[in-house]
Amino acid sequence: MTPENVIEQWANYFNNADTKNILSLYHDSATLLPTFLPKLLTSNNEIKGYFEVAFNGDASVEVNVENAIIKELPENNFLITGDYIFCLGSKGDKKYLSWYSFLIDLSSDSPIRHHHSSRVPFEFDLSNTE
């Protein structure tokens, strides 16, 4: 198992609205800062509720882990950061470019310790200041 495999599994479970298996990736003490909810989720029950709402909204995700930044940390932990595109069927298939960071513990059967996801804030882009 690699960090990339975990992200690919996560995306597969997300795209198949597989609540049981996506939750199995999150450690019992995992936290999630979700893309479409302004609240830090700190329990498996809260994380489950978030995914159920996303799945009911016909959400899907496109992930390309080849462009991700992977940092190896002590004790078989990894920080993987990259971008993905969410598509929300309930919003007319509107697409949202978003960033992710996952803290992954490959020594655990439930490797996701933390997941931060946020929409790319184009309105705050400072790279084209004039």
Image (spheres, helix red, strand yellow):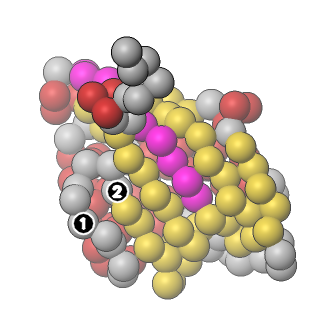
| Label 1: which secondary element | loop
Residue 71 % position (x, y):
77, 56
The residue sitting at the front extreme is 130
Q: CA distance from mark 2 to mark 1?
A: 7 Å
| Label 2: which secondary element | loop
Residue situated in front as seen by the camera: 13 or 99:
99
121, above or below 20, in the image: above
9, above or below 63, in the image: below
Give me the residue at 68% from left, 59% from top.
79
The kind of residue on which mark 1 rests is Lys
Residue 39, which numbered label? Answer: 1
- Which portion, as a residue range, is magenta? 93-102
| Image quadrant occupied by the N terminus | bottom right
Magenta includes 99? yes
Give me the residue at 67% from left, 65% from top.
104
Q: Are marks 2 and 1 in contact (CB under 8 Å)?
A: yes
Q: In the shown orientation, is residue 18 left or right of residue 2? A: left
Tell me which label, 2 or 1, sits earlier in the chain. Answer: 2
Q: In the shown orientation, is residue 72 left or right of residue 60? A: right
Q: In the shown orientation, is residue 102 left or right of residue 14? A: right
Q: Residues within 10 Å of mark 2 (few under 14, many from 20)?
A: some
Q: In the shown orientation, is residue 3 left or right of residue 120? A: right
| Image quadrant occupied by the C terminus | top left
The quarter of the displayed image where residue 82 is located = top right
Q: How many marks?
A: 2
Give me the residue at 42% from left, 51% from top.
117
Q: Residues within 10 Å of mark 1 (few under 14, many from 20)?
A: few
Residue 109 % position (x, y):
69, 74
Magenta includes 24? no
Residue 9, which numbered label? Answer: none
The kind of residue on which mark 2 rests is Pro
Judging by the rendered image, the residue that carries numbered circle 2 is: 34
